[in-house]
Image: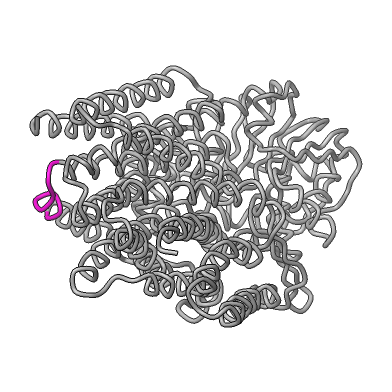
Amino acid sequence: MKRNEPRIILWVVIATGISSVTTQLLSIREFLAQFSGNEFVIALIIFVWLVLGGLGTLVSHVFARYNKISLLGLTLCSFILVFVSVAQLSAIRLCPDYFFLPGSSIGFYPTLAYILLTVGPYAILIGFVLPYSLYVIRNFQLQYPGAGIYLADNIGDVLGGALFSFVLVFWFTPFQSIFLANIPLLFSLWFIIYSRYRRYFGLFVLFSSLVLIAAPMILEKETIDHQHIGQLVHYQESRYGRIEVFENKEQMIVFTDGEPSYSTQNKRAAEYCVHFPLSQLSQVDSVCLISATSSIMSEMSKYQPQRIDYVEMDPALTNVLFQYGFLERVSGLQTIHEDGRKYLQKSKSRYDSIIMSLSEPNTFKVNRFYTYEFFSLVEKHLREKGVFCFSVQGYDNYPSEAQVQKLSSLYQTLKEVFPNILLLPLDKLYFLSSNQALDLNIPELLKKKGISTYYISRYFSGNVTKERIKSLKSLIDTESVLNSDTSPRLMQIMFQQWFEKYSASPIIFYVFLCLLGLLYMILIKKEEFVLFSTGWMNMGIELLVILTFQIFFGYVYLYVGLIVTVFLAGLCPGAWFGNQLQYFKSKYLIGTDLAIIALLGIFLTILIFFTNMAIAFLLSFGFLLSLICGFQFPVALELQGGGNNAVSRSFSADLIGAAAGALVTSVVLIPLLGLQWTLVVFIGIKFMSLACTIWRR
């Protein structure tokens, strides 16, 4: 039996990788659904996961020095992992109403604390188990290489990512997915119990475990219905997000990714969205809707357009909107299930008006519809006197500094494309833009057309006055930085506004991270800094690719599993090649650092000189970069001797570097510097790593 135990342990490590990656991806999607699709949450989850994973790795080394390492201990830890993964998903979904006021928005620090509380236990345990598995194998095979565990873990990670990306995300709910992902690990553990203990005891443990982790599947809908909004009448896990429909008395509300998006009693928004732009036109033949608001179709039918192109990416969402009466099927309506930007990029149609009904530009997914590149695309699809309309949150009397910056950047970006802009301050701030002059007296225009309205005819003149518009324009900073795809200025402003809203500041968080990072830099060895920079680079670029994908394509909720899987897939063969080397390891480290710098330079060149990005390029780039990063790990590990202490410190350096790269890239570098300068920073970090390797030689 002892001869086979290293192989059995490797199967446990592979199965643990399958379970852990699926758990991580499900946790990311669950948080996106709970926190309105805010991509900053992705960075915070990965940061917490990796930092606490690194802590768990160090704890494992300390534990191994003072306690006996055994296969039984690994089996118990792995069983705990299974149950904690299910408990983690349940906690993310069920606990917000107990920690936060239902329906309220949540600040940065409470969000970080909640992620620490829900994700932390599993992250520490998964970091503990990986080096512990190596120590157990070395009880049976003393010279077993540390890179072997790294390879087995990567194989499991890739299998888990592929399972999630190509099967689970399309056909199964979150609790069904977590159940299926844990089955390989449970059967691996059953085989250990079967081999070393009584057969019937192993069957009892396996059956009991399967029943326990299957129980949440039966109650999945009840975990959604806990919110104090009304009765849940529809729940669906779409490929692009979570869709929930609640009924409260006579009102029905659609929630997408935890955010109320449509209401059956919000006809005011429909009047504003439709009549503000269409009242400016002498004739309306064709209109393009990028997303929609409730009752917008019935208001638009008053103009009797020949063609209404309604562009909505998620077919499941449009089915719900028509099924429950949020939208009406009117004459000339054509529903197009495609991303709004992608549709305009390939369409040759021109419209009398393009109306955009999207949420605030507080995520990379939505921000891409408020950039110079998108506004230019809209202008090309408008007829000579066409009108473009959208809205953002306004303010009542005293705007904050972040609100003024947001307004200024939006206005100046729009002004670069359209010579005529009309601002209408109501419950929201409406932007009308066109190549023709725009008329402020909208009620009179509607009266001449014989179109009746309720809210505009009664409340428009009292709320929209020349004095309010003049006051609004006086706040605009004419020197404001434009918002573009590769320099998302609004994301920096919205991140700042996130703190302002709760009278908080990110400075405390930044100072804490800098001091912690400086202390860590002082304590680590030069080889560990190479792994730290490699981990930073791999995870930082992974987040960069995820956010670049979101900026150019807008549906990373569907593709996040595939992107993560591609990065994991590159690590595995890279680590295998690096493990085969016997000589000249320092030279290979220098060569791979230069290769990473070259790859980053290629990415930077493409961002500067090309306006579009291919999905195949992003995935190929991610695979090549992770291949090189995977190659560096066993090389740097062997340069430190490959002992237990070196293994734990190397794993820890890699994880902590990856955590720092994930957080700093998405929360600081991209919002503050944009994509191009972020890549320049990455190149600088790799030059520092190169200098350390040369210095060591």
Of 527 and 490, the residue lying toward us: 527
Q: Position of residue 324 (x, y in %)?
A: 82, 62
Q: Which quarter of the figure is the N terminus placed in?
A: bottom left
Residue shown at 76% from the left, 47% from the top = 315
Above or below: residue 464 compared with residue 476 = below
Is residue 201 on the magenta stretch?
Answer: no
Above or below: residue 68 compared with residue 519 = below
Q: Position of residue 638 (x, y in %)?
A: 21, 41
User: How many numbered badges does the structure rendering display?
Assistant: 0
Of 53 and 264, the residue lying toward us: 53
Q: Is residue 334 visible?
A: yes
Above or below: residue 157 compared with residue 533 = below
Is residue 520 on the magenta stretch?
Answer: yes
Which color scheme does this rendered protein use? one colour
Residue shown at 45% from the left, 79% from the top = 99
Q: Position of residue 529 (x, y in %)?
A: 18, 43
Residue at the farthest top position:
609
Q: Is residue 418 visible?
A: no
Position of 384 with respect to 449 (left or right) is left
Position of 541 with respect to 246 (left or right) is left
The part of the image, by quadrant, that contains residue 74 is: bottom left
Of 215 and 678, the residue lying toward us: 215
- Residues shaded magenta: 519-526
